[in-house]
Image (cartoon, grey):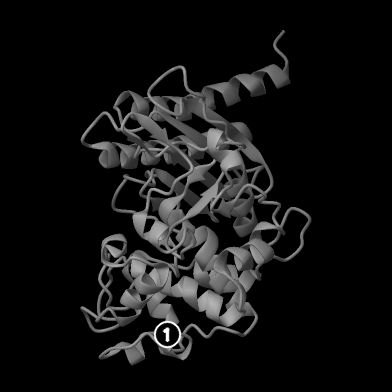
Amino acid sequence: MVSVTSIALLIQAASISGVDSAVAWGMKAGSFPGAVVVVGTSERMLMAKGYGYFTWSEKSSTPNWDSTLYDLASLTKVVATTPSIMRLVELGQIDLDASVQSYLPEFTGSGKDVVTVRHLLQHRSGLRAFLPLHEKASTAEEARHLVEIEPLKWKPGSRYEYSDLNAMLLGWIVEEVSGVSLNRFVADEVFLPLDMMQTMFSPPRAFTNRTAPVGLWRGHVIAGELHDQNAVRLGGVSGHAGLYATGGDLARYAQMLLRGGRDEQGEVVLRRETVALFTARGKDGRALGWEMRDTTSEANSGSLLSSSAFGHSGYTGTSIWIDPVRNLFVILLTNRVFAPRTRRSITILKQTRGRVADAAVKLKTEICGRKCD
């Protein structure tokens, strides 16, 4: 006679196989050599698993969900910069509708006096998407100055343009208002309270062997060195990129947001109303800092997450989706930028994300139905 426990384990194994198949498809297609997937609810982990290898060699390490560090790239925007802004808004030290110039007087130029903090979070500041600071500046100070004097391309608030410059400015606002560096502020206010001890800027060399590599240089694997060269020019700590983390740490962060800003013990890290404010769908299908699920496309977030799901992705191959309606988070970490074996690595990665998200929804349904809600 098969026990209830055995049946439950069989169901879980069958459900996880959907995630396994999605990740295997992305690896076989040549988008990335390995990955970490973590799926869970506000109160429990449903699965946490590493796949493939650090490189395309089977002699390299298999990623571990709770010890392998990934270069998060643009996930920095929502894991470090956005929660820092949220915290300072709660403390009454930042007004979302105040001008950027009121915090950064050096942010000068025609029409820039009406650019607000909210505009930066919405990517509606009027700034261009990108500047090659690593080519135009020789120091972090010069790079910052170039961003601060960069002229607007559009009238503030008139159009959406996803821009790294917005996040850089937000990071500097955090530093000017708090009086400490962005990495110090977010560590004290968010990472330490959540026991995210493996989330950091500029990891020490001791972490190199367990950091997923981001490229090859003359045949040598590059790990522990930032892929984003603008972040490198800015000293390794920036509002737009530079953060490293493990799947386990990101799961703790996602669970905090699903709990309305509370940690595992029920202590308040961020207020519920602040979380609701920053994760509500706004103009152009975005929230404040976060992306909202595009219900017209299955790429990136699949078809089964609710329209209230919010998330973000990173150029290196990282992503996180958090669905407050389904009480579900889905984390997929890859090192897509490491010598992809296909010219369509981003397209395939987006499709993989969608497949993993849909498999995660089914996983939750089959394991616990509505009992996890």
- The reply to whether residue 304 is in sight is no
x and y, in percent, of residue 336 in the image? 36, 38
Residue for point 58% across, 53% down: 200
Q: Would residue 268 be found to the left or right of residue 319 on screen?
A: right
Residue placed furthest toward the top: 1
- Please name whichever residue, 350 or 68, is drawn nearer the observer in this view of the structure: 68
List the single residue furthest toward the right: 265
Identify the secondary structure beneath mark 1: helix
Question: In terms of image quadrants, where is residue 58?
Answer: top left
Q: Amino acid at mark 1?
A: Val
Q: Which residue occupies 60% across, 84% down?
A: 93
Which x, y percent locates residue 166? Answer: 37, 72
In the picture shown, does residue 64 fall above or below 108?
above
Near-viewer residue (222 or 276): 222
* Residue 240 percent location from the top left of the image: 42, 62
How would you rate the neighbour count of disc 1 (Cα within 10 Å): few for under 14, some for 14-19, many for 20 or more?
A: many
Between 362 and 256, the one nearer to me in the picture: 256
188 left or right, relative to 23: right
Q: Give the quadrant of residue 108.
A: bottom left
Image position, residue 242 (x, y; %) = 47, 55
**Does residue 249 show up?**
yes
Q: Is residue 35 above or below residue 85?
A: above
Residue under label 1: 100
For the N terminus, give its image quadrant: top right
Image-based side of 3 in relation to 317, left or right: right
Give above or below for 186 relative to 220: below
Depth check: give the residue in front, 138 or 277: 138
Q: How many marks?
A: 1
